[in-house]
Image: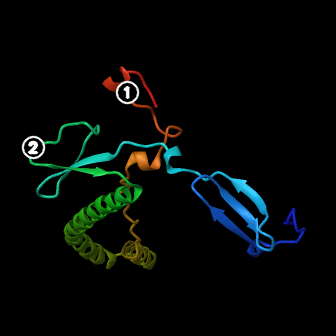
């Protein structure tokens, strides 16, 4: 970049920025000539969204309300998630709860399945006494593959739709508020 006033060859380190509420200026570090001017972006230009409203019960139960003005069920407390950080933290909380429920379910299922598996394997080992060598090798390979089976990772996949989708990738709303016509 070349300064239009002192004609000095400038690198980015040779310039500095002056910001005010009205504008931002990039100036030459050698002669303070204004190289570039632009208007800053204001937060008010961002589209404001309704908060995500949930209802929390005394025992930790969570209910999702269909609208921000929906009535809160008896015994529940209203909680508004206004910022992306609050919504992300809530998503992590729900996903962690669902992961814990899934792990508990899998432990119980594995405990019940291990009894059946042990019985089936003892029957298979008894039958292997009368098998050919090829049959015995095949049965051992099947047992080894079953023992070394990798479980898929669980992902609850919970997300707040308004944080991850916009009008370009979600269907419009159909409700009394939109006179029962699809509106984005």
Q: Residue 138 falls in which quadrant of the image?
A: bottom left
Mark sitting on residue 174: 1
Q: Is residue 123 rendered to the left or right of residue 159? A: left
Foreground tag (1 vs 2): 2
Q: Choose between 147 and 12: the one closer to the eye.
A: 12
The residue under the point 39% across, 31% down is 173
Which residue occupies the foreground of this view, 128 or 107? Answer: 107
Task: Report the side of 136 relative to 93 (left or right).
Answer: right
Foreground residue among 149 and 101: 101
Q: Is tag 1's residue or tag 2's residue first in the polypeptide sequence?
A: 2
Whether 37 is drawn above or below 144: the answer is: above
Looking at the rendered structure, the number of numbered marks drawn on it comes to 2
On the image, the x and y values in percent for residue 67 come to 29, 37
Report which residue position mark 2 lands on: 74
State the residue at coordinates (43%, 25%): 182
Disc 1 to disc 2, C-alpha distance:
27 Å
């Amino acid at each position: 970049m070349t300064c239009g006033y002192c004609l000095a060859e400038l690198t980015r380190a040779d310039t500095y920025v002056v910001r005010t509420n009205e504008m931002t200026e990039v100036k030459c570090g050698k002669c303070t000539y204004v190289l570039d001017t632009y208007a800053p972006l204001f937060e008010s230009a961002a589209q404001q969204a309704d908060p995500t409203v949930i209802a929390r019960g005394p025992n930790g139960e969570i209910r999702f309300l269909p609208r921000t003005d929906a009535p809160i069920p008896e015994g529940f407390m209203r909680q508004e998630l206004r910022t992306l950080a609050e919504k992300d933290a809530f998503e992590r909380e729900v996903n962690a709860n669902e992961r814990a429920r899934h792990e508990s379910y899998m432990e119980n299922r594995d405990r019940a399945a291990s009894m059946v598996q042990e019985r089936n394997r003892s029957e298979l080992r008894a039958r292997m006494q009368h098998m050919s060598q090829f049959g015995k090798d095949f049965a051992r390979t099947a047992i080894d593959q079953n023992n070394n089976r990798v479980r898929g990772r669980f992902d609850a996949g919970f997300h707040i739709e308004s944080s991850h989708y916009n009008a370009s990738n979600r269907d419009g709303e159909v409700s009394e508020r939109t006179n029962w016509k699809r509106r984005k």
